[in-house]
Amino acid sequence: MEKLVITGGKRLSGTIRISGAKNAALPLMCTALLTDKPVTLHNLPRLADITTLSDLLNHIGTTVTIVGRRKSNVVGRSLTFDTPEIHDTDAPYDIVRKMRASILVLGPLVAREGEAVVSLPGGCAIGNRPIDLHLKALEALGAKIEIQEGYVKATAPGGLKGGNVRFPFVSVGATENILMAATLAHGTTTIENAAREPEIADLAACLNSMGAKITGAGTETLTVEGVEKLHGTEYTVMPDRVEAGSYAVAALMTRGDVFLENANPDHMQAVLDTLQEAGGIVEIEENGIRVKANGHVKGFNIVTQPFPGFPTDMQAQFMALAAIADGASVITEAIFENRFMHVPELTRLGADITVTGSSATVRGVKSLRAAPVMATDLRASMSLALAGLVAEGETSVNRLYHLDRGYEHLEEKFRQVGAAVERVAT
């Protein structure tokens, strides 16, 4: 076991290069199941979730290899995923339980092989996230679904057929799953109330580069004209908007000046707007975003919403920011019901937070005090690390495996802009 030890009080200044987006990379990796030709992905982050999904794909029949850079503008790590044949249409519990995104192999397997048996997923405990929408969407394309002994069995012996899918509420994962499945369905599929997140547009662009016929990416209605076969591709993963937002908060909390190289402002407007509301200076530059402090942090109000609204994946980080703001902030979590589990740990550091239902009132304090804290989920981990940057004394963040799921080289990136952060064995 390891922990993060942070000595607070350091002003952050310098450049942080933003890695490829985990939430985009995972579905992009699953596209390799839709074709018997190689799919090469550039700018893949080194994260535990990437390793977990690679293990699952390898179990199914995908060979994963590290490749050299083929283009002068390629950044990050490049891997090739090659699935000439599907060796096993079963996705076992021992792998799937580690990460909810493993359910994304379901749609591609049914589309290509006409069958799949996938364990009900595990993952972080931020709320009840059933996969009903994934299953009903596949049923709309003609799949037969059974759930037995903790596994989903989906079959479509004659292949999937185009149909109309309308989600009762926005789901990123369900949109991704049915989007991939529909590319090989017979006929045309319409997906209504689809997620509009940039990661969906990234997936659609990758699939189109493989020969898919998808229109409407970035809107609430996607149209997919099924094709008989997809070919391989070479594609670069979009920058991680959540990582960029997290380091932007760090710059403001420490009254620093940080350039977020490779960050895309079009993907994070709601976050940038809130940073400015809180008193930060945001400057859009040619190859990224600069975030600077402008005096004291001011209180703000946010409500999490699907894109283009304020992202739930940034709620915990902004709660850490609100903890040291002048005045009160109100943060309402409208996506996941259990995503305030970081509140007790922030209060250990001296934060003044009152939770009423789905809203938290955060009254800013003059200073936070170091203490040992325990991460409860991925984004909560980052909120505690951010609080540690400004807390008086030495804060230790335990359960680092949560952070390792979503932040590449966290301590190195913090140190290169002046933070006093170490990873130590416990």
Image (cartoon, rainbow, N blue to C red):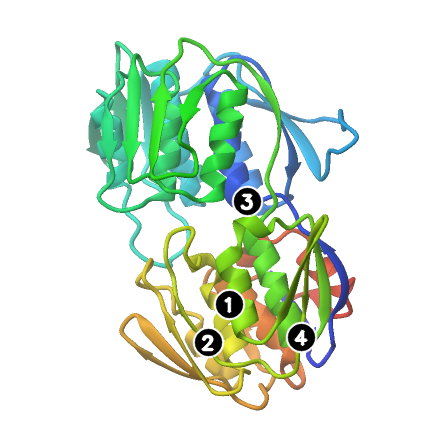
**Residue pointed to by mark 4:** 293
Kind of residue sitting beneath label 2: Phe
Q: Which mark is residue 300?
A: 2
Using the image, tell me which numbered label, if any, was put on residue 10.
Answer: none
Which residue appears at 65% of the width and 44% of the height?
A: 46
373 vs 92: above or below: below
Query: Which mark is first along the chain, 1 or 2?
Result: 1
Circle nearer the viewer, 4 or 3 = 4
Name the mark on residue 274.
Answer: 1
Task: Give the SS element for disc 1.
Answer: helix
Tell me the amino acid under the disc marked 3: Lys
Label 1 to label 3: alpha-carbon separation? 23 Å
- Describe the element under mark 4 as helix, strand or loop: loop
Callout 2 touching callout 1 (CB < 8 Å): yes
Q: Tell me which label, 4 or 1, sits earlier in the chain.
A: 1
- Residue 282, image x, y percentages: 64, 64
Tag 2 secondary structure = loop
